[in-house]
Amino acid sequence: MILRPLGRAFRPRSIADGACFMLIAVFVPITYIFQVTVIMPELHNVGSFWYTVIWLAGLFLVFNLTSNMLACMLVDTSIKMVILKPPLEAHLLSRWHMCDMCQTLVPPRAWHCEVCNVCVLKRDHHCRFTCCCIGHHNYRYFFYYLLYMCIGACYVSINASIYLWYLHADYYWRPYTLITIFVPALSLTVHASWENFYVVIYELNLLAFGMSTLLLIYHLPMFKRGAVMKERQSTKYDLGLRANCEMVLGKRMHWTWLSPFVRSDLPHDGVNWLPGPKKD
């Protein structure tokens, strides 16, 4: 595994990349503070068994969400991470192609990203929220980033719903709350208050849950077939569910959910790809 220099990893490639990254960088810690200091004390006695369990579970979610996001940004999955040596075997060399932008021969499943301005091994897509391309060596971290975002946003949304619409229904069940939901900037400008800010955090969590769920639904079929976005209708590289999962999560895939720091070597170098066995 080769890491990008910090200056390159954290430098947004576009204004959209920078805006999306900052949204997550600010949103995640604020949501955790909101959950721990505002919601949880009203749902559980501070220091009780369930308060402690949920607090630790929250730390686990925030740790995995942020660390997988950072790992996704730091791990280099471009052709610059390896010295490309076109194979001598004719059947392997025929699968390589010329990239007009990089002016070099690149392996099969490596495609050029116009935002990153480099070819990426087994490129899936360019992720705005991590300011980098998702490819062979960092797909694992992107997958867990999405998964923990979905779980965390779902949990906070449920608890915030109880807090807003049940415990404090006398304040939030009113027409003005609709303005805060649909025009949050106007609401916070006209009447800046913690109560309105809580609604904005709640709304952002609903949005995060919806987006991460849709992205998981979109990517899971490709994940199971061993494909990427350019091959989403293809089963050309399908090796079976277990082998496809191992190709993304590594040889110790059953432990990778614990942390991005769990070492799990990939069974392929991401360069010379051969089609999987044909299915009847």
Image (cartoon, rainbow, N blue to C red):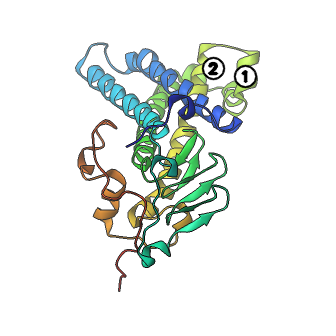
Q: Which residue lies furthest to the front in this view?
A: 88
Q: What secondary structure is found at the residue carrying circle 1? A: helix
Residue placed under numbered mark 2 in the picture? 196
Q: Which image quadrant for residue 26?
A: top right
Q: Quadrant of residue 148?
A: top left
Residue 53 position, x and y percent, is 26, 25
Q: In this view, does 215 lie to the left or right of 100?
A: left
**Do the residues bearing badges 1 and 2 touch, measured as CB atoms within 8 Å?**
yes
Q: Which residue is drawn at 52% across and 56% down?
A: 123
Q: Is residue 185 visible?
A: yes
Distance from label 1 to label 2 (Cα)?
7 Å
| x 46%, y 63%: residue | 222
Q: Is residue 258 placed above or below 223 in the rendered structure? A: above
Label 2, secondary structure: give it.
helix
Is residue 203 visible to the viewer in this orientation of the structure?
Answer: no
The residue under label 1 is which amino acid type? Ser
**Label 1 Cα neighbours within 10 Å, binned few <14 / some 14-19 / many ≥20:** many
